Image: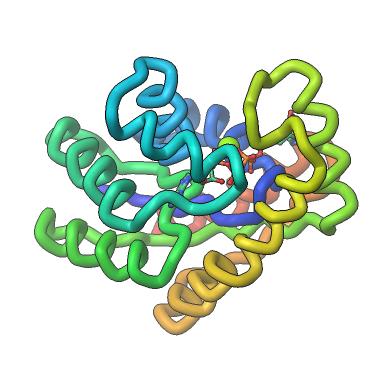
Amino acid sequence: MFNLVLFGPPGSGKGTQSEKLIEKYGLIHLSTGDLLRKEMKAGTPLGNEAKSLIEKGQLVPDEVVVGMISSALDANPDAKGFLFDGFPRTIAQAEALDKLLTLKKTAIHAVLFLMVNEEELINRLVGRAKTSGRLDDADPEIQRNRQAVYKNETLPVAGYYQNQDKVSRVEGEGTIDEIFDRICSNIDPLLEA
Ligand code: AP5
Ligand code: MG
């Protein structure tokens, strides 16, 4: 199996690049944000619980997202590999993911870290708010909170993977295709190895 984490702040292009990466490398896309929005849309108890946190730009509890990821891994026993987008977002999630993958006799092979400056991030999300319908895009105050939560709770996850020597930093500004090429030039040598 070949498993990747696409890492970066809200608005850094994880979802955008994931679409292209899963196609090129035949991976299964696991976005906890997308999974949570599906639960919210279906009005499940989990979705209703998550809604009040997502609306404020706060993280949902680790147990909730780890449970969703665990189910998704089990549901795809024949996968060539997984692309994790927006997960793990805390050290506890990263540790839980390592345990789940070890049980499946696999691991994270690389973490691609999209680097984008904060002003560009806010501009992108303000742009997306016009069409996304996402409750957490609408209000600039909530967007700022998402960036703060990222810095406090999620950024340490980069250090966690840095200690495993798995992080590649990728310049995340430019056209979507330019960024995709930069990401691929980090992945391809790993596949040839
Ligand atoms: P989630 O859905 O994961 O959102 P996020 O991390 O905040 O990131 P976004 O989806 O907003 O941005 P992105 O990096 O995917 O960028 P995109 O490609 O869309 O999480 C939402 C919420 O769910 C969290 O706040 C939390 O409450 C909860 N949650 C999710 N996972 C969790 C977890 N593991 N633990 C706890 N809670 C969790 O691009 C952004 C915009 O920019 C788009 O409009 C796009 O078209 C545009 N764009 C993309 N690339 C470019 C480019 N190169 N140039 C110009 N514009 C671009
Ligand atoms: Mg996304």
**Residue 189, position as x, y percentages in the image:** 50, 57
Instruction: Inspect this view and state whether residue 155 appears.
Output: yes
**Residue 66, position as x, y percentages in the image:** 27, 52
Instruction: Inspect this view and state whether residue 26 appears.
Output: no
Q: Tell me the quadrant of the picture where the C terminus can be found.
A: bottom left
**Residue 73, position as x, y percentages in the image:** 20, 41
**Residue 184, position as x, y percentages in the image:** 59, 46
Q: Which residue is drawn at 69% across and 63% down?
A: 148
45 or 125, which is in the foreground?
45
In the image, farthest residue toward the bottom: 163
Q: How many marks?
A: 0
**Is 133 located above or below residue 193 in the figure?**
above
**Is 165 located above or below residue 193 in the figure?**
below
| Residue 49 falls in image quadrant | top left
Horizontal arrangement in the rendering, residue 166 relative to residue 98 (left or right): right
Horizontal arrangement in the rendering, residue 92 relative to residue 31 (left or right): left
Q: Which residue is drawn at 43% across and 17% down?
A: 41
Q: In which quarter of the image is ligand 2?
A: top right
Q: Which residue is drawn at 63% across and 26% down?
A: 134
| Residue 100 falls in image quadrant | bottom left
Visual colour scheme: rainbow
**Is 37 located above or below residue 140 in the figure?**
above
Horizontal arrangement in the rendering, residue 15 relative to residue 80 (left or right): right
Q: Which residue is drawn at 26% across and 38% down?
A: 80
